[in-house]
């Protein structure tokens, strides 16, 4: 074919690719690029054909999608550009699919894809304002491309135990400024600090994240990992217990229980360590999971005649340490219980909870669910409650002395 024939072919094939035939179109044109006969004028439309082919290729086609991305990166196309950003979204999707396939071992062809290496070649300096924009989907706000990218980047770096490059660190810092409401970004930036050995900075960000989302158990366990347990074992245990006590399926908390068991083993409290290990075994077996080798090694350290004993009463004595770690820097306001709201009997959203309205001296009302703070929900109106506020909302509460 002549140069003009190829230009015409690529141009005419674009609409066919856009309308659902992109994979076939790509397969017919890719060899022309590989042998050097694709004119530069056709690089831009071929880039869009690659994007549509990526979008139309099934999730499991990991290697083929990797080849498409590699071919795109060899094209001479303008950037920053919408096309360049759309290719990034496909790279993010590929990373997630490859990770899931590798984890589940669904087929012998499951591969891996490094979003870190790809982003270096793609060049984070090519991010556009639109890549930072959150979108609406079916009435719900979805994360921006940048937020999704940071999630993938941090996951890969954490898995490989590699500190982030300056570009990725700078991107995460900018994301914190752009999305101050994002607990995920705070947690991910904390992970980057941790990978760099900056435990103090990691601890500070995790405290902020927990204030905004105390119900996320993994935040508590991550915060615990920033504590030197040899120097402050009680705080370390308190944070792990908070992680266990937070909402979330027990089947995902086995590692936390094993960390607690290790603490008990370190002080020869074998009966408590055994209790934690047996709970871990129960959860793993219920899900058909194999227990890690470290579990067996820990179990072998426990005398054979040990009787398991639940350490929960001891954990509860450390709760104040975890609360102080998170909330000690917040101001406290005393308010009075002025209204009691019983839960609906037919609640469809899990365990129904009693709610209290609290009113401070200035007449400002706050709502809390007393059981979240281990307060008896049946206390009468007039009960005095000391609450700690974050962004105008109660994040911690305790009974104050007396009844108004």
Image: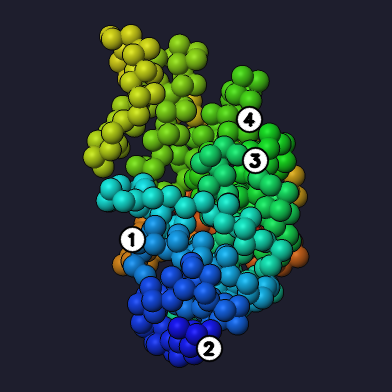
Mark found first going from the N terminus, 4 or 2: 2
Provide the residue designation for mark 2.
Answer: 4
- The residue drawn where x is 37% and y is 48% is 102
Contact, CB < 8 Å: mark 4 with mark 2? no
Measuring from the top left, give residue 254's x and y in whole percent.
39, 35
Question: Reading the chain from its start, which is encountered first: label 4 or label 3?
Answer: 3
The residue sitting at 40% across, 87% down in the picture is 16
In the rendered structure, are the residues bearing label 1 and label 3 in contact, judged by CB atoms less than 8 Å apart?
Answer: no
Give the mark nearest the N terminus, 2 or 3.
Answer: 2
Around disc 4, counting alpha carbons within 10 Å, would you say few (fewer than 14), some (14 to 19), or many (20 or more)?
some
- First-in-chain label (1 vs 4): 1
Callout 4: SS: loop
315 w.r.t. 383: above or below: above
Q: Give the SS element for disc 1.
A: loop
Residue designated by label 4:
227
The residue identified by callout 1 is 60
What residue is pinned by disc 3? 163
Q: CA distance from mark 1 to mark 3?
A: 30 Å
Give left or right: position of 147 versus 297: right
Quarter holding the N terminus is bottom left
In this picture, residue 221 sits left or right of residue 332: left
């Amino acid at each position: 074919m002549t140069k003009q024939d190829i230009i015409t072919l690529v141009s005419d094939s674009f609409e066919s690719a856009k309308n659902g035939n992109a994979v076939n179109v790509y397969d017919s044109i890719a060899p022309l690029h590989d042998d050097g006969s694709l004119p530069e004028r056709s690089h831009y439309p071929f880039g869009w054909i690659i994007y549509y082919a990526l979008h139309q290729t099934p999730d499991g086609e990991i290697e083929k999608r990797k080849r498409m991305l590699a071919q795109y990166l060899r094209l001479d196309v303008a950037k920053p550009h919408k096309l360049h950003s759309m290719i990034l979204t496909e790279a993010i999707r590929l990373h997630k699919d490859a990770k899931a396939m590798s984890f589940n071992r669904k087929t012998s062809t499951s591969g891996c894809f490094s979003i870190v290496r790809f982003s270096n070649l793609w060049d984070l300096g090519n991010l556009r304002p639109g890549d930072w924009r959150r979108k609406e989907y079916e009435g719900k706000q979805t994360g921006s491309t940048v937020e999704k990218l940071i999630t993938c980047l941090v996951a890969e770096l954490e898995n490989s135990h590699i500190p982030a490059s300056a570009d990725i660190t700078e991107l995460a810092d900018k994301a914190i400024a752009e999305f101050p409401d994002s607990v995920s970004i705070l947690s991910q930036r904390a992970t980057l600090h941790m990978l760099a050995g900056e435990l103090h900075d990691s601890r500070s960000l995790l405290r902020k994240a927990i204030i905004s989302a105390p119900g996320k158990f993994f935040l508590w366990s991550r915060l615990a990992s920033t504590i030197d347990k040899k120097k402050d074992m009680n705080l370390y245990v308190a944070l792990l217990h908070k992680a266990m006590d937070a909402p979330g399926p027990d089947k995902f908390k086995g590692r936390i229980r094993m960390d607690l068991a290790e603490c008990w083993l370190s002080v020869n409290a074998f009966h408590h360590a055994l209790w934690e290990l047996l709970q871990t075994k129960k959860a793993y077996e219920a899900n058909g999971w194999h227990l890690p080798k470290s579990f067996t090694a820990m179990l072998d350290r426990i005398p054979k005649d040990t009787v398991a004993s639940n350490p929960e009463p001891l954990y509860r004595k450390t709760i104040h340490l975890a609360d102080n770690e998170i909330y000690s820097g917040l101001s406290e306001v005393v308010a009075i219980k002025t209204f009691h709201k019983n839960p609906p009997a037919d609640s469809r959203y899990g365990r129904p909870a009693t709610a209290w309205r609290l009113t401070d001296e200035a007449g400002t009302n706050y709502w809390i669910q007393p059981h979240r703070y281990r307060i008896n929900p049946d206390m009468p109106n007039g009960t005095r409650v000391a609450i700690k506020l974050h962004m105008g909302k109660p994040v911690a509460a305790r009974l104050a002395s007396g009844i108004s």
